[in-house]
Image (cartoon, helix red, strand yellow):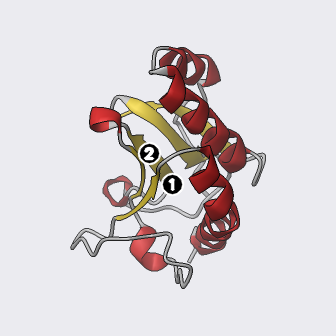
Amino acid sequence: MAKSKDVHDPDAVTAHIEKLDPEIGVVVETIRQIILGVDPLISERIKWNNPSFFYSGEMLPFDPKTYKREIAVFNLFKGRIMLVFPGGAKVNDDSGLLTGDYPDGRRIATFDDLDDVASKKEALLSVIKTWLTLLNE
């Protein structure tokens, strides 16, 4: 089984969030805590210039170009709060949380504010838990 070589770096994530507009930062921090609370083997670091989450546990060998270990990465361009799920197309999401139909398998969840996060929390938890069950398939 392959173990992650990615480095868990919560301090870098915290520093990144602290530099955000406070209204966006509080939403990002809330989503961060939801994701990290799903499983202790979910780790975080800055990747692609934004906070991202990956599975740090044991996995069967896989092609690293598939980004199979990646769970989600924030896209905070121009004040939008989006979570990009690189393998989101593999998740059967009937909640409507994941949107887009990108050929590379990405799906995106968008959040407007804390109320929106609260209304989408159960769907977000479900997507992440489902993703974790697919890791070694």
Seen from the viewer's position, the closer of residues 104 and 113 is: 113
Left or right: 70, with 84 as reference point: right
The alpha-carbon separation of the residues under discs 2 and 1 comes to 12 Å
Quarter containing the C terminus: bottom right
The quadrant where residue 99 appears: bottom left
Under circle 2, the secondary element is strand
The residue positioned 53% from the left and 80% from the top of the image is: 93
Q: Residue furthest left?
A: 103
Residue annotated with mark 1? 69
Q: Is residue 97 above or below residue 79?
A: below
Q: Is residue 79 above or below residue 106?
A: above
Residue annotated with mark 2? 73
The residue positioned 27% from the left and 34% from the top of the image is: 78
Residue 65 drawn at (x, y percent) = 31, 55
Residue 89 drawn at (x, y percent) = 40, 76
The residue positioned 70% from the left and 40% from the top of the image is: 33
Which label was assigned to residue 93?
none
Q: Amino acid at mark 2?
A: Val
**Dot 2, crowdedness within 10 Å: few (<14), some or many (≥20)?**
many
Under circle 1, the secondary element is loop
Seen from the viewer's position, the closer of residues 30 and 1 is: 30
Quarter containing the N terminus: bottom right
The residue positioned 59% from the left and 20% from the top of the image is: 14
The mark closer to the camera, 2 or 1, is: 2
